[in-house]
Image (cartoon, rainbow, N blue to C red):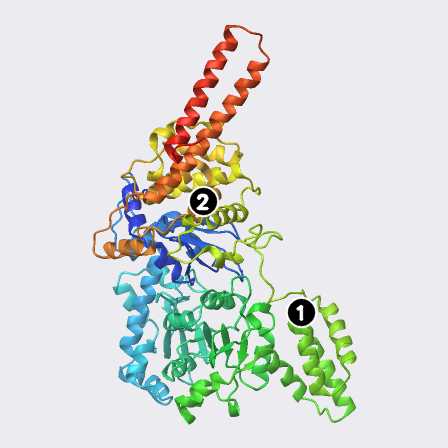
Amino acid sequence: MAGMILKEDVEKVRAAADLYDIVSASVTLKPSGTGTYVGLCPFHDEKTPSFSVRPSLGVWHCFGCGLGGDVFGYVEQQENIDFREAVELLADKYHIELHYEAGSGREEHSGSKRTRLLDANEEAQRFFVSQIMSKEALAARKLLGGRNFSQADCERFGCGYAPQGWDNLVRYLAAKGFTQQEMLDAGLARQGQRGVYDYFRGRATWPIRDSTGRTLGFGARKLYDDDTIGAKYINTPDTQLYRKTQVLYGIDLAKSAIVKKRQAVIVEGYTDVMACHLAGIDTAVATCGTAFGAEHAKIVRRLISDDSLGAVQLIGPLNVEGQSLSSRIVFTFDGDAAGQKAALHAFALDSAFLSQTFVAVADGNLDPCDLRLEQGNEAVSSLIEHAKPLYDFVIDAAIARFDTSYTTGQMGAVKATAPLIAQIRDRSLLDIYTRKATRRIGVDLDIMRREVNAARRQLNVRDDDAYAPKRRFGGAASGGGMGGSGASGGFAGRGERGEDPYANPARRKALERRDANEQTYYRIDDAVFICEQQFMATLIQVPRAIDRAWFAQLSLSNFMTSVFRSLFQAVAAAGGLPSDDTPQGLWIHNLTKAGGPLLEQVINELAVMPLPLPPNPRDTANSSAQNGQNAQNGQAAPVQLRAPSPAERRYASELLARLLDMGFMRRIGAAKRKMSQLPDGEEKITLLGDITTMETARKDLQTQVYGNVA
């Protein structure tokens, strides 16, 4: 067992890791207020963004599922690994050498197990590519050349060749220092009676990568009749890296285009992806050995999220000046029975996804690769452009099987289509498609409705409305309680970068109250709570804005809300206000550690909560990105707590003054109650003097912060 990683090395990795870069590899992030970005949570299924990232603080939090933490916590959740492995994975990414405490030996190989498996796959990819031009690989080159793919095209998509034989790859990887167990764990080899042998043999290969370009596994096509594996295509078996329900071939090439165009094209094979990209459809991806399912839908939806009207969902096809602007997913199913079966399978996906899903079927049921081969690139582009809504495709295909010129054919079509329409969970579309099918078949609307309703009851279909405004918390709409503040629901109303809510008292108060409404740890909305919440958020995000002398005067009596009383104690347990040279990430880490699991979510939420202040140029993802660049240059150094802006310092002083003033008020009130119960005498006179002193201190405090007061 290896020793623990030295703390200073952990902090080097924390400082170098670019949280924005790491999260945006799988989530489309959009600016939302000062230094904050939002997107669809990668850890639970949602349709409205509730996932916030604050790169400058190195903190993320999801208001939907409650998960949150620092960059290590994100990698732990994303990669399903422990803290140590997360540190090692990021150290490998940013080329930082780790040192371990003495007393126990290192593992046999450097890097985490997951990193070793990634390295093994990368070496395997290099091996396969090196073999594609060999004499033995003629069959693979003929296969690719016969589909009109040039050598340059094959290099672009990483096409390779796994040679025939028993252990060519095994021997190659062994020479590179990989163990047989690592080859087995990566899915590159299998255990036989006579030893370990290559899993891929005598086949053309394609690397299956994640959105960041890391090779997770491979797909391979049969080339020879004597192949002992009968399947035309095989894929890497499920491993620690590779899950067939969670990978999409070509996502590394298509990701940026999918995000930019908010569109994705789902095809059925590796060569179809190649054909689409070469034809200009740069948003094409393919599933790997399995049907398109819910996990794939989550990946795509996180990249094409469309919330440009806030809580109002833009999920139908929109056209503005002839250009489609809405999210759009196009499947290239075949028009035959297998394609219709695949389309039916897609009905299990959620309503918001299906409402923006289309089907493209070429004449003659050609797949994109064959279509490009026979009719050229323009035909592929036209195929995608003229795709048909999925609902229409499935329902029309069912009706087309019957001769509706006869009564029996009409009833057969009704019986066939009613269960399909019944599966449309979106109630806003259910009636429309019931009417469309009725007109197409030529029967009374009551007949079709009766059959649809009966099928809906039998199937126990969950009612839904994909077009309805989404609500984030238990019945309370996002931004609830804001009245006429002008803030739209959800995160869309948080304000664009460059806004200064502090300059507008109404906007400032609106943002403060929304912060109180949208937090999940204490459901209340009053002036005392808002003041304490804003102070704690400022303390966490910009601790250097807090006046140390005034902060030293605070005590538990200055806080009424139980969660903030506990958080105040956690600050004390963490050593009080951090010194100016404390690394930013270490401050959050120390506070979270002191607060423990009970306060971890509270701290995460407060760290990403927007403050009603003008944007600070230093509080942006650019500084985080620069950190990552410095790490690449070998200059990684902890990012110190940034200096506050004048507005931040003033706001912190106002909040501190309010807390201290409330403390004086409570002590004065308690003293006056006690004094009223005492007889005239020395003790009463002493109390009166204390009250006078506190009232004077209270007035002096207000004068310092707000100027002359009445």
Is residue 162 in sight in this rendering? no
Nearer to me, 364 or 689: 689
* Mark 1 Cα shell of 10 Å, populated few (<14), some (14-19), many (≥20): some
Q: Secondary structure at mark 2?
A: helix
Residue occupied by mark 1: 427
Residue 82: x, y in percent? 41, 49
Q: Earlier in the sequence, mark 2 or mark 1?
A: 1
Residue 667: x, y in percent? 50, 22
Q: Secondary structure at mark 1?
A: helix
Q: CA distance from mark 2 to mark 1?
A: 38 Å
Question: Looking at the rendering, in which quadrant would you find the N terminus?
Answer: top left
Residue 640 sits above or below residue 445 on the image: above
- Extreme front residue here? 710
Residue occupied by mark 2: 606
Is residue 282 in sight in this rendering? yes
Residue 495 sits above or below residue 517 on the image: below
